[in-house]
């Protein structure tokens, strides 16, 4: 929508994803503080799902694009997670992730690395391959590769959990951006003017969400079955695939 969007000033700088999260983490933190992306409801539901799925059994989890990990840390507190590995390209966020995860009784490893490089370069399998609000920054062909690599890194019987912004079925990217940015400008009123401008510019430049059905097809091509779908809040969805022996 960049060329057609009246809501994003052409005069504003257009940082990369890494530059945005490095330099503007406070704006994203304010979105979390105000629950504008429904993290509270989504991660409460995820915590309940993981508790009832694992029922006290220990499991390992890799978090791709972990950010400050503040909500996954809360979701994991009622579980027996025994190993957490978090990857992100923004070291500002990773420093805060270390603090948030210090309350989770498991081994924690954090690394500043691109999530695709991390997936490709390792062989360790995890019980849960997890990602929240990061994969929509990848182009479609990279998302296809994401599912292939994620399938390689999920342990047999393990889970691939994807929380992300998603387009409505049949909606194109421009219509999605107009709708999402319009709602953000109307409702995210506790952000400063500079912060909302920076956030909307970032979304306009760098968000490439897919519809749930498109992600489900990519997952199927990588060998996953139908996902479990947790409740969605506005455009914020949770899809969970279980790796069967056939993967
Ligand atoms: C919207 S934030 C989400 C953070 C956290 N997962 C959450 O749910 O609040 C997106 C995060 O993904 C990270 N990110 C985006 N693209 C990435 C990539 N290619 N590799 C690693 N991290 C990435 C950003 O630095 C940022 O911390």
Image (cartoon, grey):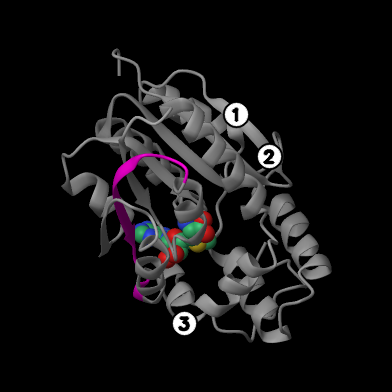
Residue 24 location, x and y as percent?
52, 79
* Viewer-nearest residue: 22 or 204: 22
Kindly identify which residue carries mark 1. Answer: 229
Describe residue 50's horizontal placement relative to residue 185 as left or right. Answer: left
Task: Please tell me in which quarter of the rendered image ligand 1 is found.
Answer: bottom left
Q: Which mark is residue 232?
A: 2
At horizontal 67% and vertical 53% (from top left) the residue drawn is: 38
Magenta stretch: includes residue 87: yes
Residue 147, percent from left and from top: 37, 35
Residue 146 appears in which quarter of the rendering?
A: top left
Residue 225: quadrant of the picture: top left
Ranked by sequence position, the earlier of labels 3 and 2 is 3
Q: Quick one: which residue is furthest to the top in this view?
A: 246
x, y percent for residue 244: 34, 16
What whole-number distance in Å separates the C-alpha atoms at marks 3 and 2?
A: 29 Å
**Residue to which mark 3 is pinned:** 23
Viewer-closest of 201 and 152: 152
């Amino acid at each position: 929508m960049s060329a057609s969007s009246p809501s994003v000033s052409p005069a504003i700088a257009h940082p990369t994803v890494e530059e945005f999260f490095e330099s503007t983490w406070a704006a994203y933190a304010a979105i979390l503080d105000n629950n504008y992306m429904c993290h509270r409801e989504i991660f409460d539901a995820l915590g309940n799902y993981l508790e009832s799925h694992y029922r006290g059994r220990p499991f390992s989890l890799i978090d791709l694009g972990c950010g400050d990990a503040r909500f996954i840390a809360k979701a994991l507190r009622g579980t027996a997670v025994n190993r957490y590995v978090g990857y992100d390209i923004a070291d500002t966020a990773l420093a805060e992730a270390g603090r948030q995860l210090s309350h989770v009784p498991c081994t924690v490893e954090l690394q500043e690395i691109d999530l695709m490089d991390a997936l490709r370069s390792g062989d360790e399998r995890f019980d849960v391959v997890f990602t929240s609000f990061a994969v929509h920054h990848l182009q479609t062909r990279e998302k296809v590769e994401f599912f292939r690599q994620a399938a390689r890194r999920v342990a047999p019987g393990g889970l691939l959990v994807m929380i992300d912004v998603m387009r409505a079925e049949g909606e194109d990217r421009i219509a999605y951006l107009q709708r999402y940015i319009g709602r953000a400008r109307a409702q995210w009123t506790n952000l400063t003017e500079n912060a909302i401008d920076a956030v909307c510019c970032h979304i306009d430049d760098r968000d490439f969400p897919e519809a749930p059905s498109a992600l489900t097809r990519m997952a199927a091509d990588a060998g996953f079955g139908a996902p479990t779908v947790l409740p969605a809040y506005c455009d914020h969805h949770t899809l969970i695939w279980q790796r069967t022996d056939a993967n």
